[in-house]
Amino acid sequence: MSTLAAVPSEIAAPRRAIRRRRRRRIGTLLLLLPGAGFIAVAMIAPLLQLALGSVGLTGLGASEGFSLAAFGTVLANPMMRDAFLFSLRLALATTVLGVVAALALAALLMLRFPGRRLVMLLYKLPLVVPSLIAAFLILTMIGPGGMGARFAMQLGLGWPQLVHDRAGIGIILVLLWHQIPVTLLILLAVVGSIPRDLIDAARNLGATAPSVFRHVILPLALPGVSAAALLVFIDCFGAFAVPSLLGPAYPQALPVMMTTEFLERAHWQVASAIGVVMTITTIAVMVLYHRLIARADRERAG
Amino acid sequence: MLSLSGVAKRYGGDVAVEDVDLEVAAGEFLTLLGPSGCGKSTLLRIIAGLTDPDRGRVWLEGEEVQDLPAHRRRTAMVFQSYALFPHMTVARNVAFGLVMRGLDRQQIQRKVADALALVELEGLAGRYPRELSGGQQQRVALARALVTEPKVLLLDEPLSNLDAKLRDRLRIELRALQRRLALTTLFVTHDQAEAMALSDRIAVMTKGRLVETGTPEEIYSRPKSRFAAEFVGVANLLPGELRGEVVTTAVGRFTVSAQRASAGEVAICLRPEDIAFAAEGPGLPGRLTHVTYAGPFQDCIVELEPSGLLLRAHVPVRPWHIGGRVAVRLPARAAVLGE
């Protein structure tokens, strides 16, 4: 009897455990929903729509069905290629110049000098001024007929073309105006987190201020520097407003081309394909960055 | 060798260091002893040039250095956190000071190897600080300081992050190394046992001021100040009146060396091991209120009758028990304390 009575309870116990586990799993999923749902709706859905739109599955003109024709148009078109290279050049130049300038400023701001607090306050000013306004400011300063040009004329000198130029100097200047403070903000936070004892130890061991910066601060701030560089690159590669206002007629920056395809030509599929190319480029840069960081860590760990 | 005169430093309205005068002889091991926040680390940083004093002068080997930047002072400091550069190997950490002084590669390699041998870390040159134990990191920090052949070695609580056993061992090694190299050393600690074990002389600090300087034996057995008497070891302080070389207290008369204190109200200091008691015989009557076994001795508190005065005594281990009546014998001589 006792053996027979034991059988149902042995079967029932695992069933109860399974039901409990299932309930717990559903509970966990419900708890995840606010965070995961937000990411899905706000981040994954637009990317998915972009990807589907690029192959003709969503958006206007989707009736033709699946097609890779838009990518063919983007990759084969020399205008698009030049736009891609132009955006890449703008982003790389701004990143390199911005990071170098921010590093120099960070080094300077580590020293004590009269007016340091004012500089600490002023450098944040561009952060609250929108890029478009900065673009107008730069235009009035260095554009043809601007302040610089008129001053040069007074001196009987010529004035180079610094806006709407093929090198994108005007665009880079405005992007730098905005990106240097952002980079500096990140760098100062990273530098501030370096233990004071390390800097004091270096000074005590005979290091001058530049040596302390080169041998201690810079290597320890490098992860922050590279993260800041990555953010600047991504931001500048996707910049639209400034290249649109200050860029040359040809080549145009890739986001400008994308907007033209969207709004003026209603080529939603081509515009989406440009968006996909830009996203892939950004992801490729991020992957490259993480690989480089991982390799540097491995080398450091020996 | 190292002299400080009238050194003072304030942070806002708070006094960090106040009019400190100090002399350290060549090859001497002097400890700055005091509670946290008493200004001892600030004083060390002023000597190293890492903190600017508000006023006062610092001399190193006869040269006035208070206006010299830190990198030109030839002092070497070991920090409480060790401050090893995390992105450099042990060898590169130790070599740092030599590279900064522009030595050639061969010289650096030889000196680094010698320094690592000195602290018995020859096999760890290629490791990173994070791969070392606390004790090993401490040795690297010491090697990094010693390799620069500094005029004065400054140690800012370098043993405080180690466990008790390792701390004890490194204390002995540190002292032996300092003696062998005849290195002028300034050591900062709040641990009085550490100060006693290591130092030729101890300078006791409180509230930014240097209250007393002397050998460990002088500070312990004949403290001049109430603060030093209470901070170093356990002290029984008895109020009394000084006349000539005799202090009269509620529990008897004590002969003191009166040259340091003027006649009148004073306090004398009796150390717990100066106090003895027996179950019976001559002595002041008392009752045990506290008995703790402390290994080589018993830590007792005895209440004297009829005064009710409590005295802390360290006595040989016997079967004493709380509430037991004893006859207390006090020494004939005691240290008299100024303010």
Image (spheres, helix red, strand yellow):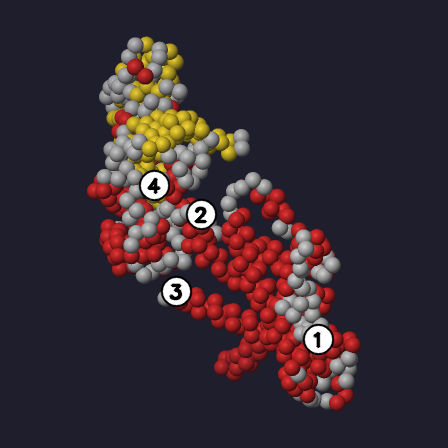
Give the residue type that dot 2 points to: Ala
Residue A167 position in % (x across, y down): 63, 68
Q: Quadrant of residue A90?
A: bottom right
Q: What chain does badge 1 belong to? A: A
The residue singled out by tag 3 in the image is A301
Query: Upstream in the sequence, badge 1 or badge 3?
Result: 1
The residue singled out by tag 2 in the image is A209
Instruction: Have a look at marks 1 and 4 and say if they share a chain.
Output: no
Q: Is residue B178 left or right of residue A136?
A: left
User: Viewer-nearest of labels 3 and 2?
Assistant: 2
Q: Residue at x 33, y 60 (%)?
A: B127
SS at mark 2? helix
Give the residue type that dot 4 points to: Thr
Whole-angstrom CA distance, mark 4 to mark 3, is: 31 Å
Instruction: Have a look at marks 2 and 4 and say if they share a chain.
Output: no
SS at mark 4? strand
SS at mark 1? helix
Whole-angstrom CA distance, mark 1 to mark 2, is: 47 Å
Q: Quadrant of residue B245?
A: top left
Query: Upstream in the sequence, badge 3 or badge 2?
Result: 2
The residue singled out by tag 1 in the image is A257
Pointer 1 with pointer 3, Cβ within 8 A:
no
Whether A159 is drawn above or below B156: the answer is below
Q: Is residue B339 left or right of residue A76?
A: left
Query: Upstream in the sequence, badge 1 or badge 2?
Result: 2
Farthest residue, direction left: B180
